Each structure stands twice: as C-alpha cells, then as structure tokens.
Image: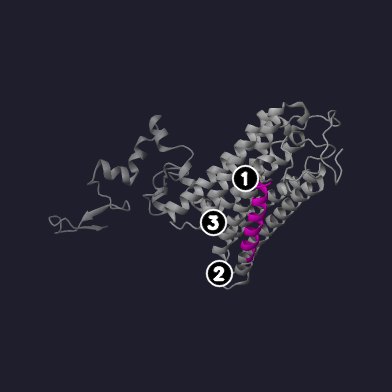
Amino acid sequence: MASAEDEFIYSKINYDEPMPAANRPEAIIGLVAPFMILAWLCSIFRLYIRLRIVRAAGIDDLFVVLNMVTITAGCITTCIAIRFGLGQHILQVERWQVEGFQKCFYVMFATYACSAAFIKLALLFQYRRVFPRGTTMHTVVIGLIVFTSLWGVVYGVMSWVPCVPISDYWLSEAPDKHCYGFGAHHPKAFLGTFESHTAINMLLDITLLIIPGFLLWREGGTRAGQIRLFGLLSMGMCVIALAAWRLQTIIEHQAATWPTRDPTWYGPISIILSALEVLAASICASIPIFWPIVSEGWGKIFVTQEIKVTRETRYFDDDDADALTNNAHSRNGSSVSQASKSANGKDKSSHYRDTYILRQVDPLHGLDERGVHVTAAPGQEERGKWTKL
C-alpha cells in the first residue's frame, strides 16, 4: 500500500473488485465521442453567428477555438489509451502498454488543464461584453480574468513539463528522475497537486455560474429572457456537478494511489468526467450566442406554407337569410342543405330564391343587391335609372 511519504507501491490487492462501468471501452467511447461532436456543432454555430451574421468576433471566440482544439486532442487520446490498457489493472498489461498509457495520460491531462482554463476565459471575456465599463461587475470580471489566466499558466506549465526532461514522465527506468507536481513520486505531493487543481477549478465554475445570476434582476429584462437565462444557469449546474463528482473520485482513490497505485483501473472515471465537464462548459458557452437565431427561425424549419382562411357572407341581414328557406333556417345553420333538397327533387324552386344565384343566372332579374324588386320610373327607361317601389 502507498503511504504519504514513501514511493508508490503496486500490488494485486484490488483484483477482486468488480469492473466499474466506466472502465469498459464502449462506455469510454460512447460517452466521450458524442459529447465531443455535440460540442463541436455548438462551437461551429457560435463562430458562424459571430463571424458571418453579426460580424462581431472577439477574444472570447478565440478562446473557444483554443478550447475545442485542446479538448479534442484530449478526447482522441482518451480513446487511443484503451489500446494501452485503460480500464484494466496496470499489473496485467504489457510493459510497452504501460509506457504508452503514460504518454497518453500526459497528453490527456495537459490538454484538459489548458481546456479548463480556455473555456473559463472564453466565458469571462463574454461576460465582459455584457457588463458596462466602470460598473462593479465589470471590475470583478476583469479580476477573475487575471486570476484564471494565472491559474491556467501555473497548472498548464506543471502539466506540460512535469519532469525535466519531459520524457522521464513515461520512462520508468530513467534514473534520478527530476519530477514534481503531476509527475511527483510521492503520493502526498502527487495527490495534493490533483486535488488543488480540481478544487480551484470547481470554485471558478461556481463563480462563473453566479455572475450571470445578476442578469436575472437587471432593469429592463423580459420574462422570456429570464426564463432562457434560468435554463442556461441550470445547464451550468450540470458542469459544477461533473466537477464535484470528479473531485470526489480523486479523493476516494487518492488520485489512483489507494488502496494501491493503479492508474489504468481507477483513472477512467476521472478522465471521462474531466472530458465531459469541459465539453459541457463549451456547450453552455456557445448556446447563448446562436440560440436566438435558431429560435427565431425554428418555425420556418417545420412550416413550409402558411394559409390564411377568411370567411365572408353575401347576406346583409337576418331577413335576407331567412327569405332563402321555408323553415327559418339560415344557409349556415340549416340541418338539411338546399343542395341535398335539390338532389332529392324537393323544392327545387327554392334554390333560385337565392339572390346571388339569380344574379348569375339572370342579371336582369329585377332584384337589387338586397333582393328587393325594382322597376323603372316613368320616362326614365331609356336612361337606365331604376328606383325602388
């Protein structure tokens, strides 16, 4: 077993443990690959809106691109690591696989450390656009940008250069290794580095979730906008939940050093959660940019034609309508239509009492627009003037 001050100890003490679901290759690929594709789609939509629609790209978009490049490299490396024993006990894999896994883990964590910083900076620069200069929130955002940048640089260097030379990180036979932090040979220093990075990462996620909460009560905000913002905050809670879950897995097995040093067996769940956390944050950062455009044109995706139906009547009052039938039923309310009567040979003459039909059949039928009989006044027949009786 590994102690706090001694070197790592490898043993078979955990061979009786059932295989966790996250250790299966299909689970690793099935979780990482779809979320990576979804994050890329959201990022592409975001960049399209910023570059082609509003033409207002900014520094936040640059960090989104850097984030997607690094996290994609990490996700691909995670899938490749399955070939080198990821998900199996480290003592059950070949020697060449152990070295290959160490190289993969080096790339996976280094890219994750950079991605975690890039996506937070993208969100912070995005917030800087929202809050006016000179306000308290604008100053807070600037301070967080400085702190996050320093955090990203420090842990980025520690992850990319864990040993000097770097190759000592994956060469187990290298004598007199000069490693520290993520490459430390003492469990206490090794665990402390992982825990501190994850804890600060989660605190920053919580802070980034609190900041847009102030927009819920800003003056002039609409209810629809508040609902959309609440939905976005709910998605942000998922990112924090993933970060907290990852911290719990690191503490539970002390960064894959307890009850024995077995990174290929205890590492998959933490690696998957790292990828999902950053990918989910990427989706949250991109949705607010392109969603207004998508929601505006959502109806056009499903509706190809719009038909407007209007109803007009050619009758002017109830008396005219009642005059068309013998049983005081209107044309619209009659239980038996005039057409059916005509078809049955009953009261065919009633069909021609309709003023509209009469005008079509005989324009000189002697009825005005209201169905009133008219006649020519004496001496006015030639001029065609008509008057009511």
Distance from disc 2 to disc 1, alpha carbons, whole Å, reads 33 Å
User: In the rendered view, does 244 fall on the left or right side of 15?
Assistant: left
Residue at mark 1: 111
Q: Residue at x 60, y 68 (%)?
A: 138
**Disc number for residue 196:** none
Is 178 or 192 nearer to us in this picture? 178
Note whether residue 92 is visible: yes
Note whether 218 is above or below 337 in the view shown: below
Q: Residue at x 78, y 29 (%)?
A: 91
Is 313 or 24 nearer to us in this picture? 24
Point out residue 79 in the picture as x, y percentages from the top left corner.
Answer: 63, 33
Residue density around tag 2, few if under 14, some if 14–19, many if 20 or more, within 10 Å: few
User: In the rendered view, does 79 fall on the left or right side of 337?
Assistant: right
Point out residue 159 in the picture as x, y percentages from the top left corner.
Answer: 67, 47
Tag 3: amino acid: Asp
N-terminal of the pair, mark 1 or mark 3, is 3
Q: Is residue 152 magenta?
A: yes
Q: Which residues are magenta?
A: 143-162
Note whether 199 is above or below 185 in the view shown: below
N-terminal of the pair, mark 2 or mark 3, is 3
Residue at mark 3: 60
Distance from disc 1 to disc 3, alpha carbons, whole Å, reads 19 Å
